[in-house]
Image (cartoon, helix red, strand yellow):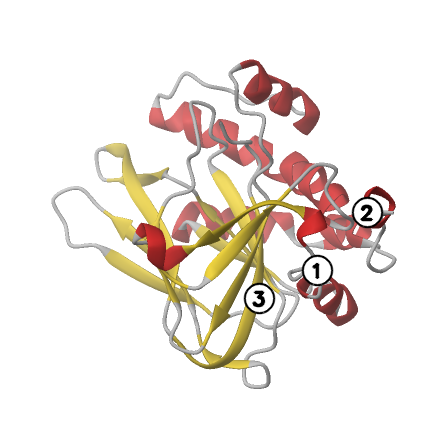
Amino acid sequence: MKAAAKTATPVPSDTASRVDTLDWNEIERELDGQGCAVLKGLLSPDECRALAALYPDDAYFRSRVVMARHGFGRGEYKYFSYPLPEPIAELRPRLYARLVGIANRWNQTMGIDISYPADHDAFLQRCHRAGQTRPTPLLLQYEAGDYNCLHQDLYGEHVFPIQVAILLSQPGRDFEGGEFVLTEQRPRMQSRAEVVPLRQGDAVAFAVHVRPVQGTRGAYRVNMRHGVSRLRSGRRHTLGVIFHDAK
């Protein structure tokens, strides 16, 4: 019975069409200019509620992490196990296909001799050959007073340089505070912070580790970190879609 429940679809999904109708030219410009871009209305309110409702059911997950035990902040998250539930299983390769061209261009600009295949399954096979076989999509849960320290989600040798986080809760109704924060550490300069406002169902695509920035003498690398500010009240759920798997 558990196996059947694990592969069930929480709600019908048309995420593929929603991904395809986004303004990807603008998303690319925002990623290039700011290191992040908002993907508005990626999930419906029903899809958001259905995914958040999975959190108590351990049948969907491979592990649970309590942040305070590791110095990551406060709050907790769970990594999904394979097979991923819908709409995550559909969303992950569809988003990858839209982001892979940007990722390859970034690496070329930064002089990083790594390119990514057009197909997400092919990239996962590369990860798995290197021993990175554990799925990385995760569901995060924050209560009042919780926060997520600035960090990078690397997990092994093979890293896709862009990831996506989707807000499943509604600010102002389900929680207060808990803003998504991105910092950019620039060479010989002070760090720059970016706070990304999101509504329920909105996603933010952002740089995992480093990204190129055009300077007066050509492109240079900046180091990126992300986190979540302190939740002042309520409960906040977020879906993290990471495209590489973990060791």
Q: Report the residue marked by disc 1.
A: 54
User: Mark 3 to mark 2: distance in Å?
Assistant: 24 Å
Q: Secondary structure at mark 2?
A: helix
Label 1 crowd (10 A; few <14 / some 14-19 / many >=20): some
User: Mark 1 to mark 3: distance in Å?
Assistant: 11 Å
Q: Report the residue marked by disc 2.
A: 2
Q: Mark 2 near mark 1, Cβ–Cβ under 8 Å?
A: no
User: Of the residues under marks 3 and 2, which one precedes in the sequence?
Assistant: 2
* Residue at 57 percent of width and 61 percent of height: 238
User: Mark 2 to mark 1: distance in Å?
Assistant: 13 Å
- Mark identifier at residue 16: none
Residue found at the far left of this picture: 188
Is residue 119 visible in the rendered image? The answer is no
Please name whichever residue, 229 or 93, is drawn nearer the observer in this view of the structure: 229
Residue found at the far front of this picture: 1
Relative to 5, is 213 above or below? above
Q: Report the residue marked by disc 3.
A: 237
How far across and down, in percent of the image, does residue 183 sit? 31, 55
Which amino acid type is shown beneath numbered disc 1? Leu
* Residue at 51 percent of width and 27 percent of height: 104
User: Of the residues under marks 2 and 1, which one precedes in the sequence?
Assistant: 2
User: Of the residues under marks 1 and 3, which one precedes in the sequence?
Assistant: 1
Label 2 crowd (10 A; few <14 / some 14-19 / many >=20): few
Q: How many marks?
A: 3
* Residue at 78 percent of width and 69 percent of height: 46
